[in-house]
Amino acid sequence: MNGRWVLLAGLLFGCESGEPLAKEGLVGGKADDATWAKACRDAGLEPDCDLCAYHGWYEDAVCDAFCPEHDPSCSAETGDGWDLYFDVQDAAVHGSVLHLLDREVVRRFDAATGKFLPPLRGPSAPLSMAVAADDGTVYVGHESGQLSVFAPGATTPSPFATTAGRVTDLVVAGDRLYAEDQSNGTWVTRSLFDRSGGGLLGRAGSSSDMWSHAFHRSRDVIHAVDLSDHVVTIELAGGTLRDVDGAFDAGVGAGFTPPVRITPGDRSILLGSGRFLDPATLDPQPQELGTTFQDVAFVGNDFLVLRAVASGPDTWSSELLTISGALAISSTRALAGWPGRVLTTPDQVVVVTRVSPFPPTDEPPRHHLVLLPR
């Protein structure tokens, strides 16, 4: 039993005198099944009991990641959305369900009902996440190099595959899963796995670490932006995982993470600088979006652009722009906080921003979730 589980066991079972201890200081995820089951049995409950409900930890105003259900202390409904008292590292959506990558678990929110669902908890803290658009399968990468998979509808993970180091990025590429890990300092290892069984289809090293990735289905490649703001194309066919063309300067600058997105119909690569590129040649296309952005989603021919705007010295807020296919702004909405993600469900637009503190400090983060009609 590792130190984290010893700590949890002590907190749940009490010290040597048998006196119960408070849970303050508990960090990490839910204990392994055996430890959790023993704590339940010692309390006279079934082995798969909810200890958080039994001990009243859902009502103690402390956001706990190890609870089987969503802890109400981790969020608060506001007049225009929800405050989130956990650190959102990334977000993805499948159907109406929003997946929020926390430093400890993958939290889930159903935009259709406005309710949080039980979190997805892996064998260790998650570093990266990808959600399959076809069936909602959730893949999680860990510090150890392990990959976990949550089948559609499942809340218990299964081992999927293993990489050589901490898994920093995951991309679902059709029936394959692309992974990047830092196995040797700044050296990046790329791996391609068969989603149906986790079999390794290819592995290659690269000196290029990437900020952002996007799968281009019709060309069977991944377009990415490296730390030098260069656009790189990674070939997937045959598992070669080699850079096949391009070093176009993404030109975002100003310390902004440069996202790369594929427009509907695979027509263009859209960069955070607002430039459109030809997917085949990486040559700039004549049109420009007219603004930099931190994220973008697509509804029909419209671009939903989430960008940062200066609201004072060293302070920032967000704007959500609707830009038509003719590249004209049709609406603008101001939002509090630094831009995070903008995503769409069948009926709604989901926006996540980092409200406090920003710039980041050692204080616990607070994000904000807003739902808007499509």
Image: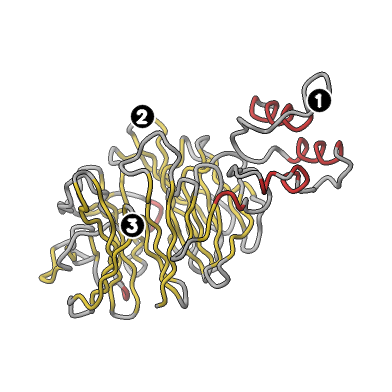
Q: Foreground residue, 117 or 211?
A: 117
Most extreme residue toward the right is 44
In percent of width and height, residue 41 lies at 86, 40
Q: Foreground residue, 306 or 337?
A: 337
Question: Vertically, is 294 above or below 202?
Answer: below
Neighbour tally class for label 2: few under 14, some 14-19, many 20 plus, Cα within 10 Å: few
Q: Give SS at disc 2.
A: loop
Q: What residue lies at 78% left-to-right and 37% top-to-bottom?
A: 34
Q: What residue lies at 66% left-to-right and 26% top-to-bottom?
A: 2
Specify whether residue 202 is in view. no
What is the basis of the colouring in this image? Answer: secondary structure
Residues at discs 2 and 3 in contact (Cβ within 8 Å): no
Q: What residue lies at 60% left-to-right and 45% top-to-bottom?
A: 61
Instruction: Give the residue at mark 3.
Output: 336
**Number of the front mark, 2 or 3:** 3
In percent of width and height, residue 237 lies at 38, 58
Q: Give SS at disc 3.
A: loop
Disc 1 or 3, which lies upstream in sequence?
1
Specify whether residue 91 is in view. yes
Of the 4 image quadrants, the one containing the N terminus is: top right
Most extreme residue toward the top is 16
Q: Foreground residue, 66 or 181?
A: 66
Instruction: Give the residue at mark 1.
Output: 19
Question: Vertically, is 58 above or below 342?
Answer: above
**Distance between mark 2 and mark 1 Cα atoms:** 46 Å
In percent of width and height, residue 311 lies at 22, 53
Q: Please state which amino acid type lies under the numbered disc 3.
A: Ala
Disc 2 or 3, which lies upstream in sequence?
2
Asked which quadrant contains residue 186, the reply is top left
Which label was assigned to residue 185?
2
